[in-house]
Image (tube, rainbow, N blue to C red):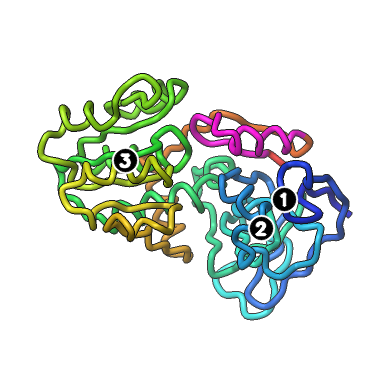
Amino acid sequence: MGQAWGFGRYGGPEVQEFFDRRDPVPGRGEVLIRVDVAGVNPLDHVVRAGLVPGLDGGRPFPRVLGMEAAGTVLALGEDVDGLEVGDAVFGFALTGGGTYAETTVLSAPNTARIPAGLSATVAATLPVAGTTAVDALDQLGLPAGATILVNGVGGGVGLAVARLAAARELHVVGTGSPAKREPAEAVGVRFVDYTTEDVVAVCRELVPDGFDGIVDLVGGPSLRTVAPLARDPSDVIAVGDQSVPDVGGRIVERRLGRENLERAARLALDGVLAPAITAVHPLSDAPAALATVENGHASGKVVIKVT
């Protein structure tokens, strides 16, 4: 038996609970891992709220929270290629296994070995934030010297986009709350505080001809405020807001396979996607870890160190 943190029904934080469970059995195309580190993401509380039921794998309640993890392979399901028992790996729990737990199952095609020199803590931050940054910037395909606005730059994904954009020699402007200023400016972002500044006015002064690309991590009214700042509406890429086509933009096209994970890992080894890990919680403190992200107070990446 091992401990896990999850939810007994769909809802808010009040439905969360610790519970004991037997080690899950890996199914076809899955690997069982001992979880060393789990990443914490806004998607976790969105899943708990029942807004994306397709991501829970149809598993019975209680369900384990979490979508990304790094750990050690304990067992293989059928039809698993390229991974072996004992491998240090990182990847996605795309079939509803959850990652805030001592053991879990990952989808084998969406799992990769951790390369030598990369810590499990860093690897656990890459499946969501790292690969999202790669996908968004690849989709924009901007040349060196282009301008990009990162709307909501202070979180794990926003900082990853900013780091990768800077490495591609793009000029980066980012919006966020005051607490997000320091980590954003540390990676070379021209920061705009939306609580004290007129975002549109400041951005038009900085980039009068409009941005060559916008990556939105906020959605809703904020997306609609900044979208007109793009030269071409089709160069507005939203990570979460599915209504972005209403303003002429596109949703990010996600590539979750092993090849993209390996690419993100190489970028992390090179220091390009070195995440700003601002909080490391034990599993017993998982409620606080998720609350920090859910309340929008996280600057950088929050992780749960399980073992």
The residue range painted magenta reads: 285-304
Residue positioned most to the bottom? 79
Where is residue 26 shown, x and y percent of the image? 73, 70
Residue drawn at 66 percent across, 35 percent down: 291
Pinpoint residue 126: horizontal percent, then vertical percent.
49, 48
Q: Which mark is residue 225?
A: 3
Residue 50 has which mark?
A: 2
Mark 2 residue type: Gly
Please identify the quarter of the rendering in which residue 73 is found: bottom right
* Lateral position of residue 209 relative to residue 179, left or right: left
Marks 2 and 3, the one that precedes in the sequence: 2
Q: Examine the image and state in which quarter residue 274 appears.
A: top left
Q: Disc 2 vs disc 1: Cβ atoms closer than 8 Å?
A: yes
Whole-percent x, y for residue 50 in the image: 66, 58
Cα separation between marks 2 and 1: 7 Å
Mark 1: few/some/many CA within 10 Å (<14, 14-19, 20+): some
Q: In the figure, residue 306 lies in which quadrant?
A: top right
Q: Residues within 10 Å of mark 2 (few under 14, many from 20)?
A: some
Quadrant, the N terminus: bottom right
